[in-house]
Image (cartoon, rainbow, N blue to C red):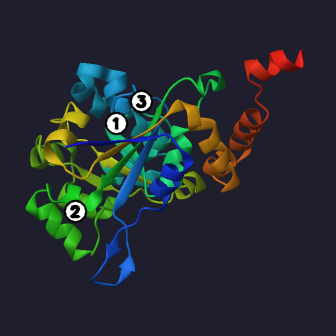
Amino acid sequence: MIKTVFIDCIDDVMQLISEQEYNSNIQRIRSSYFYRGVPDVKYRMVTSLQRNCKNLQKDLEKPILRNFTKYASIEDPSLCDSVWKQMIVGQHHGLPTRLLDWTYSPLVALHFANTENNLDKFGKRDCVVWRMDMRESNKNLPQKYRDALDAEHAFVFSVDSLSRVADSIEQYDLDMGMDSIACIEPPSIDQRIISQYSFFSVIPSGITDIEDYYERHESGLVKYIIKKEIRWDVRDLLDQMNINERIIYPGLDGLSKLLARHYYVNDEVSERTGK
């Protein structure tokens, strides 16, 4: 069941940021929450492969990965060794894949929820931060996947550990069916992945409606809806915490995005100044 929480004040945002999970076995805070920020409450939880290829995604996924690997191997020959690395590197560069983005940082998720390509939309639509409990999610995994995670004292797969359990898309889809989803941590191929504290859900082809899957299979998913009236306030709070485009996208592109937003003038201010 998906729990929905409405956030309409900064105090509630601070509660989202500071929520933690205490591990009594080691007497430390070790949260298993992953977060996903989306700028519009109306956006469904879909992968880029679903969005791009629609009902032909199963037929087109392998040709997409094959051609990406064929031409991208000049940059990284190891792509040929793992389909999961092909997906991760491809996703990172805009390739349509079955991967769904998450982050370990609620601040990073809030950044993505409170980011707009068209800044005129900023105060005109509610945004969303999803929170998933990864330990709860892993209870749905087939036994051999849970055993593999337990052997490494982990609650998320690496490229290598997932490859040892399922070395092909076909094997993964057969194992997962419609009843489970594994999560993978990408290798640190560049600073952007590190800065964004990225993780990915590997959506099986049998799961065509991701939100329906979570509704039916998991009790730990929370949908935080941040009201449009406080989005600029949240954005300013994140800037003060040094969570911004310059940090999330290291380099001149991120810096330019930050400066464009920082110096954005809305219509009301423009009319009032008469300039």
Foreground pick, 84 / 178: 178
Tell which circle, 3 or 2, labels the residue nearer the N-terminal end. Answer: 3
Identify the residue at image location x=63%, y=46%: 249
Q: CA distance from mark 1 to mark 2?
A: 21 Å
Disc 3 designates what residue? 41
The image quarter containing residue 81 is: bottom left
Q: Secondary structure at mark 3?
A: loop
> Is 126 displayed left or right of 266 in the figure?
left
Query: In the current view of this chain or complex, which residue is farthest to the bottom?
Result: 26
Disc 1 designates what residue? 66
For label 2, the crowd category at 10 Å Cα-Cα, with few meaning under 14, some 14 to 19 and many 20 or more, is few
Q: Secondary structure at mark 1?
A: helix
Q: Residue 4: where, in percent of width, then height?
A: 32, 41
Q: Nearer the viewer, mark 1 or mark 3?
A: 3
For label 1, the crowd category at 10 Å Cα-Cα, with few meaning under 14, some 14 to 19 and many 20 or more, is some
Foreground pick, 106 / 189: 106
Label disc, if present, on residue 209 of the rendered structure: none
The image quarter containing residue 274 is: top right
Identify the residue at image location x=45%, y=46%: 89
Foreground pick, 30 / 231: 231
Vertical relation: 192 (above or below) 151: above
Tell which circle, 1 or 2, labels the residue nearer the N-terminal end. Answer: 1
Q: Residue 101: where, in percent of width, then height?
A: 40, 44
Q: Residue 207: where, in percent of width, then height?
A: 18, 36
Q: CA distance from mark 1 to mark 3?
A: 34 Å
For residue 61, say whether it is visible.
yes
Q: Residue 75: where, in percent of width, then height?
A: 53, 47
Disc 2 designates what residue? 164
> Is 38 displayed left or right of 152 in the figure?
right
| Kind of residue sitting beneath label 1 | Arg
Vertical relation: 16 (above or below) 115: below
| Kind of residue sitting beneath label 3 | Val
